[in-house]
Image (spheres, rainbow, N blue to C red):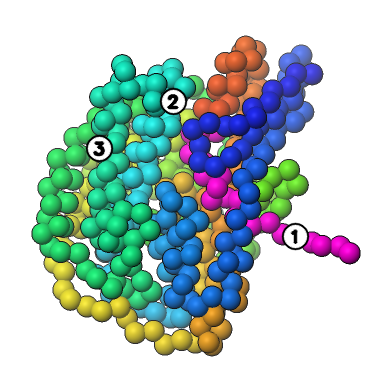
Amino acid sequence: MEEIKVSHLTKVEGHAKLTVKFDKEKKRVRVCVLEVFESPRYFEVLIKGRSYKEVPYLASRICGVCNIAHLIGSMLAVENALKIEVTEQTKLLRELLVLGGIIHSHVLHLYLLALPDYLGYSSALDMTGKHLRLIKRGLTLKEVGNDIVNVIGGRSIHPLTAVIGGFTKLPKQENLDKLLKNLEKMKKEAIKTVELFASLKAPKVEFKTEFMALSKVGVYSFIEGNIKTLSGFEFKPKDYKKYLEEKVIRYSTSKHVTFKRKSFMVGPLARINIHSETLSKDAKKLLEKSKFNLPNYNVYSANLARAIEVIHCIDRTIEILSELKLRKERPVEVKVKRGEGVSATEAPRGVLYHHYRINKEGKVTYVNIIPPTTQNTKSMEDTLKQLLLSKINLPKRKLVHEMEKLIRAYDPCFSCSAHFLEVKIIK
């Protein structure tokens, strides 16, 4: 019996460790445990009892990288509960926020967390000698996402102007025009990013897993639609509890989520597998050029999927900015009443659920938030087992590296996933 222990995973957000026990002769994996030991953060409890107005600002603090996803997801759920209909202009401005957040997150992961794995470095800092040009490209592209959020939302992290029902302050047209020019210029660097990640040698391993993503006919949607699996099953966001099972795991502060009692994967690879036909024209061309076979069951391909999504997000942002003519409007007036609302949106790492009940005084009485990493954690364990069996004869050092690289392909945010634990006190 051989044992591998990785006491602390690097180049991921949050804290986790991995323990694997396997038998080489019998080709069996006895133990594969991904322990998330990030402290529980109790955001659901913090939100409960608060005014509906406070929900987006509290929820967005779950994560500094995915703050836009939590901001918009929580707003949509509250608006569903209170039956609030926002204007088309508000919808477009919110979409711009989401697109900026995804560009920022994807580029940060690709250049600073994933790329060192493939170029043989322990961190991005070690790359600044030989590959300073690549690091500069990554930082410049990341700034594009930050700029979009800053112009639309008032600041690049935890934006201020987006509120329940609309925006308290609209961006200036001249700043939108500057954004448009910069995006058209920086698209060339995004195309080079796709070419770079298409050229990297990733392990050729197919993993047996299901994929799940938000889906809307004719749209590569990040903020509305039904939930669809690669196998063709579809359900409405409000019905998520009928099909997804959350389970507390004794060795982890992150729950496991299963679909039909099995693990599944969410995120960019799932989105491209399920509705690649709705990508922008140039993103589809690059997908074909990179020989990205569909459906793609190689989890390592998630990095190339991210790079292709950056192209799509830039194209969609250019499309919106080219047509958007702002008119003055105030947030929709809110009539407080009892209600229940669920939203399913796409965070950079995959489907994100927000679920709230609000009483007639406007106070939140129930909260449930399921981030994408919570959904991916069980999938990580299952794909690690498959990887181990296919690479079982590798030297220990190389095997550990491949397992870490596989986990990083999910771009996990363990600090997001460890938001709550059920606690029972027995006297």
Relative to 281, say whether 177 is above or below: below
Q: Position of residue 423 (x, y in %)?
A: 75, 60
Q: Position of residue 335 (x, y in %)?
A: 42, 87
Sequence-first disc among 2 and 1: 2
Q: Amino acid at mark 2?
A: Ser
Q: Residue at x 51, y 27 (%)?
A: 405
Residue at horizontal 70 percent and vertical 53 percent from the top? 247
Q: Is 160 left or right of 343, judged from the image as shown?
A: left
Residue tagged 1:
423
Q: Give SS at disc 3.
A: helix
The answer, for residue 58, to whether it is visible in the render is yes
Q: x, y percentage for residue 192?
A: 24, 29
Does residue 96 appear in the picture of this structure?
A: no
Element class at badge 2: loop
Q: Which mark is residue 140?
A: 3
In the rendered view of the protein, which quadrant contains the N terminus?
top right
Label 2 and label 3: CA atoms lie apart by 18 Å
